[in-house]
Image (cartoon, rainbow, N blue to C red):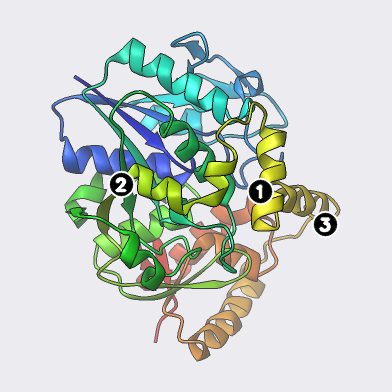
Amino acid sequence: MTRLIVAAGGGGDAVAAAILHAALYGDEDQAVILTYAWDRLLIDPLPGPRGADSFAGLEPVTQSVWSVPAEAQPIAPAGSTLPRLASELPHTLALLDPHHGAEGITRQLEELVSHLAPTSIDLLDVGGDILAQGDEPTLKSPLADALTLAACCQVNAPIRLLVAGPGLDGEISPDDLRPLLGALVHTFTAEDVEVISSILEWHPSETTAMLAATARGARGICEVRDAGLPVPLTDEGPTVHEVDLDDALSHNSLARAIMTTAALDEAEAYSREICGFSEIDYERNKAAWLKDQPPVTLNPENVLSQLDRFQADARTRGITHTTFRHITEALNLNGSQRDELRRLLIHSRPDQYDAPLWNIGA
C-alpha cells in the first residue's frame, strides 16, 4: 500500500508528514511525500521555491512529477534540505513545483493519484495558516499553503486536510483557529516523534521543532523567527485535527482567488492584492540585504556573553524557550553559522538543551 501525503507548506511540513505516517499508519506501508523545495535563506540563498531545473539527479515519477533521491543535488547557488531528508527517511520525496501556479500543482496531483492509486491522501499543514483568511496581521507565509489547498480542492479524489500543532507557526492564534478545527485525529507523543529525532538535530524548521517539543512535554512560550514572535507551547501543540477541505477553501480567500493561476508570478500578484504582501518579496528583500552584510566571526566568549544578555531580556518578556535559528539572528550571526552556534551552546550549556529547542533557563 502507498500513502500520499502532501506537505502543504513544504519545509518542516515534510518532516511532520513522516511523524504523521508513523503515528497513523505505522510500518504497514510507505508514503510518497509531495513537498516544495522552499527552504529559508539560511539554507537556500535564492528567494522563493525551487523547481526541477534547480536540481541534478532527480528521478521521473510521472510527466510532471520528479522524486528527490538522496543522491540528488541542488545546482549552485541553490540550496535544499530535500536530498539529505531523503537519505534519512524511508519514504519517497516528490517535488511539488508551483511555477505553473495552482493549475500546475493540480496536474501534478492528478498524475500522482493516477500513477500511485494511493490508499489514502492527506494534506498536512503544521500551524494552521492554511486556514488564514488573508488579512490577519500576524500572517507571514500564506502563498505556499494557499496553492496546495487550491490544487487539492480541484483533484477528483478524496483528500483529507489535517492541521497539526494549531498556532505553532505563530501566524494565527490558537483562539482564532479553534472554531475552525474539526475532529481530533491524534495527539502526538514522544514515541511518535522519535522517528525524526535525528532529523531535528539539523533541520531548520522552527514550527516542526516546536511540534516535536510539545509532544515531548515542553510547555511555556517559545520565541521564533527573525521578528521574535512569541508562540505558546501548550497541550494543544501536539494535536492533529481534521478540517473539511471545502470549509477551508471557503475561509481562505487567497486560495479561492488563485485556483486558475497558471504561473507562480500570477499567484504572487494575488497574494499582494489580497494579503497586502508576498512572502517571496520579503525573501527577495532579505536576500539582497544579507548579500551586503560583512562576514561575522563566531567568537565563543563573545557569543556566550551576548547569549546571557539575550536570555535575561527574553525572561522579562516571559519567554521560556527559543530556537537556534532565532538565537542566530538575535546575536546578529550569519544564518550559515547556525550549526556552529548550536554545537557551541549545547557543548557549553548542555542542561539548557531541551531537544530540539533551547530552554533559556530560570
**Label 1 belongs to which residue?**
271
Query: Mark 1 to mark 3: distance in Å?
Result: 29 Å
- The residue lying at 61 percent from left, 43 percent from top is 43
Q: Earlier in the sequence, mark 1 or mark 3?
A: 1
Q: Position of residue 263 (x, y in %)?
A: 67, 28
User: What crowding class fits label 3: few (fewer than 14 Cα within 10 Å), some (14-19), or many (20 or more)?
Assistant: few
Query: Mark 2 to mark 3: distance in Å?
Result: 45 Å
- The residue lying at 57 percent from left, 61 percent from top is 139
Q: Position of residue 361 (x, y in %)?
A: 40, 81
Amino acid type of the residue that numbered disc 2 sits on in the rendered structure: Asp
Is residue 144 at least partly visible in the picture?
A: no
**Label 2 belongs to which residue?**
244
- The residue lying at 42 percent from left, 33 percent from top is 152
Tell which tag, 1 or 3, sits nearer the viewer. Answer: 1
Which picture quadrant has residue 117?
A: top left
200 displayed left or right of 23: right
Mark 3 secondary-structure assignment:
loop
User: What crowding class fits label 2: few (fewer than 14 Cα within 10 Å), some (14-19), or many (20 or more)?
Assistant: some
Q: Nearer the viewer, residue 169 or 201?
A: 169
- Give the label on residue 293, or none: 3
Is residue 18 shown above or below 253? above
Is residue 265 shown above or below 244? above
260 displayed left or right of 117: right
Mark 2 secondary-structure assignment:
loop
Amino acid type of the residue that numbered disc 1 sits on in the rendered structure: Ser
Q: Quadrant of the C terminus?
A: bottom left
User: What crowding class fits label 1: few (fewer than 14 Cα within 10 Å), some (14-19), or many (20 or more)?
Assistant: many
Which picture quadrant has residue 92?
A: top left
Asked if disc 2 and disc 1 are in contact, CB closer than 8 Å, the reply is no
Q: Nearer the viewer, residue 133 or 236?
A: 133
